[in-house]
Amino acid sequence: MKRSERLVDMTKYLMGQPHVLIPLPFFAKRYGAAKSSISEDLTILKHTLASRQDGILETVAGAAGGVRYIPFWGKKHAEEFLTDLSSRLEDSNRILAGGFIYLSDILGNPNDLRKLGKLIATRYAYSNINVVMTIETKGISLAQAVAYYLNVPFVIARKRSKVTEGATVSVNYISSSIDRVSKMELPTRALKKDSNVLLVDDYMMAGGTLTGMQKLAKEFDSNIAGICVLCEADFDHVKLLDNYLSLIKISKIDTAKKIILARPGSFIAHTDFDRF
């Protein structure tokens, strides 16, 4: 192979297996090239990713070493995307009853999901996450996107158990309306003891659903390594939890005047982008 061909194939291979350590001899055998040539290729790729702030290529020395691709966005990319997303969410046609806004078009858009998954994975790239957890139904696509870029499984807490999932563990929690108690369940095989869990959800009002997921994870003796939501409703609600991050903060929804005020949330301020 020519170097240009190797670089294209190598980039595709590494990006298709995020966070996986690939030994250098694998690439040497794959392309029939010397290790020194592979090292030079990886150096080119590393500098290119860093200059575009579109990923980190880590090399691990030693006999058991190799190279791994870490999906990682630069701060400029994050700010541009969240500013654009905030603007799109201020469309008055998104207003729904009960202080909610319509998000299905974003959560069903592959391009938006790819960016959201990579952005959240950037924040938790070095947090040793073992599993991403969400609750049915709107948060499923978001959790799957995050899990892909972290290269970990994702699990779904359900409001009603399914016979195909076997035995379950359930907890009661206060719903977002803070006026009724609901139940969520997770299969007993879904989480291993001492797992580091990242909780992900699409929309947070008071945070009742997320506190329920916290309780559920603790029933499995797992650790909460992070909590991240796509949108946070920052009005008329006393939060039931702290230590969470939001990509977008909805500061006002006026159903009478058809007004939505949205801006980037706490995510950027609490993310270390200086790793390139």
Image: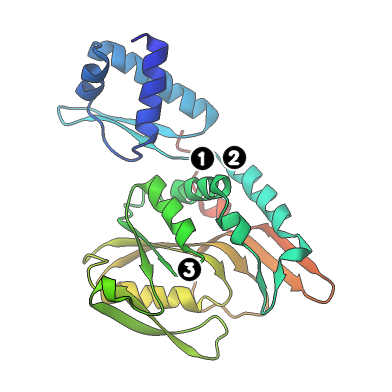
Judge whether residue 131 can be spotted in this image.
yes
As helix, strand or loop, the secondary structure at mark 1 comes to: loop
Disc 3 from disc 2: Cα separation: 28 Å
Q: Amino acid at mark 2?
A: His
Above-or-below relation of 176 to 134: below
| Residue occupied by mark 2 | 77
Judge whether residue 265 can be spotted in this image.
no
Taking depth in this image into account, of 185 and 226 the one nearest to the observer is: 185
Q: Residue 171 placed where, x, y %?
A: 35, 83
Q: Tell me the residue at 28%/79% (across/down).
A: 169
Task: Specify few, some or many for label 1: CA neighbours under 10 Å numbering under 14, 14-19, or 20 or more.
Answer: many
Q: Residue 65 placed where, x, y %?
A: 21, 30
As helix, strand or loop, the secondary structure at mark 3 comes to: loop
Disc 2 from disc 1: Cα separation: 6 Å
Q: Amino acid at mark 1?
A: Trp
The picture quadrant where one finds residue 258 is bottom right
Q: Which mark is residue 256?
A: none
| Residue occupied by mark 3 | 137
The picture quadrant where one finds residue 203 is bottom right
Which image quarter holds the N terminus?
Answer: top left
Q: Tell me the residue at 26%/35% (across/down).
A: 21
| Residue occupied by mark 1 | 73
Q: Residue 231 placed where, x, y %?
A: 59, 63
Q: Tell me the residue at 61%/39% (across/down).
A: 76
Question: What colouring method underlies this structural image?
Answer: rainbow
As helix, strand or loop, the secondary structure at mark 2 comes to: helix
The earlier-in-sequence mark between 3 and 2 is 2
